[in-house]
Image (cartoon, helix red, strand yellow):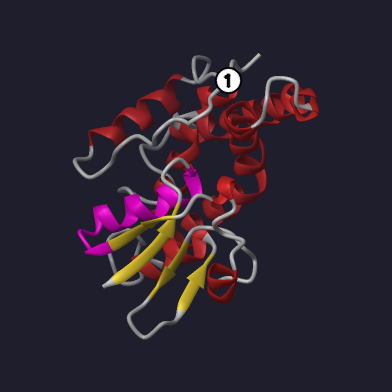
Amino acid sequence: MIKVYGMSSSGNCHKVKLALELLEQPYEWIETDSAAGQTRTPAFLAKNPNGRVPIIEREDGSVLAESNAILCWLAEGTSLVPANAWARAQVMAWLFFEQYSHEPFVAVARFICGWTPADSPRRADLPRLRERATEALAVMERHLQAQDWFGGQAVSIADIALFAYTHCADDGGVSLAPFPAVQAWVARMLALPQVMAMPSPPGLLPAA
């Protein structure tokens, strides 16, 4: 059985959980609180020298890190990746978009609001992060005005990757209100029996 080392309130870890649930694949979840330093212990660093979650560990002890790489491995040969090469490339394009144009802004705004004190100097970054997050959501909105899903005719790992931090963007003060197509897509995702919302950050502070 696959072991997943993850932090339940992390979107990158939530991606892996959602994929496993959608694939109905058994796994053991090992809660690993990176905010408390649990990814910096010698035992964890022996598994992932980068000191981050999520990682998965197979029964033979081999380890894979990086959330979107894990999604690709889990979904290989399943309905979560289109069989058609062009459609599969579209899924990959959205995975790159998520890591480069979406996660660095939506997720970081959420982290600052949920894990840093109210007087943290990092809060000065919030206006810029929210502006860039809104730009990413606008790209998603334009796509979803014509398509129900990202990169295919059905839910794929691109949807999983983008859903993880989008559905809780408000935790970082990023509103989905201007984006009705994104809101409808989030609702479609949550309507899937295996898809659940992510827990809020344990120390969520006011977004302003």
Residue 141 vs residue 69, the one in the foreground: 69
Q: Does the magenta segment cover residue 16?
A: yes
Residue 151 appears in the picture as rendered: no
Residue extent of the magenta highlight: 10-27
Q: Quadrant of the N terminus?
A: bottom left
Q: Quadrant of the C terminus?
A: top right
Left or right side of 199 for 35: right
Q: For the residue marked with disc 1, what is the amino acid?
A: Leu
Q: Is residue 11 positioned above or below 122 on the image?
A: below
Residue 167 vs residue 27, the one in the foreground: 27
Residue 103 vs residue 51, the one in the foreground: 51
Mostly what secondary structure, the magenta segment? helix
Q: Does the magenta segment cover residue 7?
A: no
- For mark 1, give the secondary structure: loop
Q: Tell me the residue at 50%/59% (across/down).
A: 68
Q: Tell me the residue at 66%/49% (across/down).
A: 100
Q: How many residues crowd mark 1 within 10 Å: few (<14), some (14–19), many (20+)?
A: some
Picture coordinates of residue 173 (x, y %)?
59, 20
Left or right side of 163 for 24: left
Picture coordinates of residue 25 (x, y %)?
23, 63
Residue 93 appears in the picture as rendered: yes
Q: Which picture quadrant has residue 44?
A: bottom right
Q: Tell me the residue at 59%/71% (across/down).
A: 42
Q: Tell me the residue at 29%/58% (across/down).
A: 20
Q: Which picture quadrant has residue 87?
A: bottom left
Tally of marks? 1
Q: Is residue 84 positioned above or below 179 on the image?
A: below
Picture coordinates of residue 206 (x, y %)?
59, 15
Residue at label 1?
205
Q: Is residue 12 positioned above or below 123 on the image?
A: below
Left or right side of 132 for 40: left
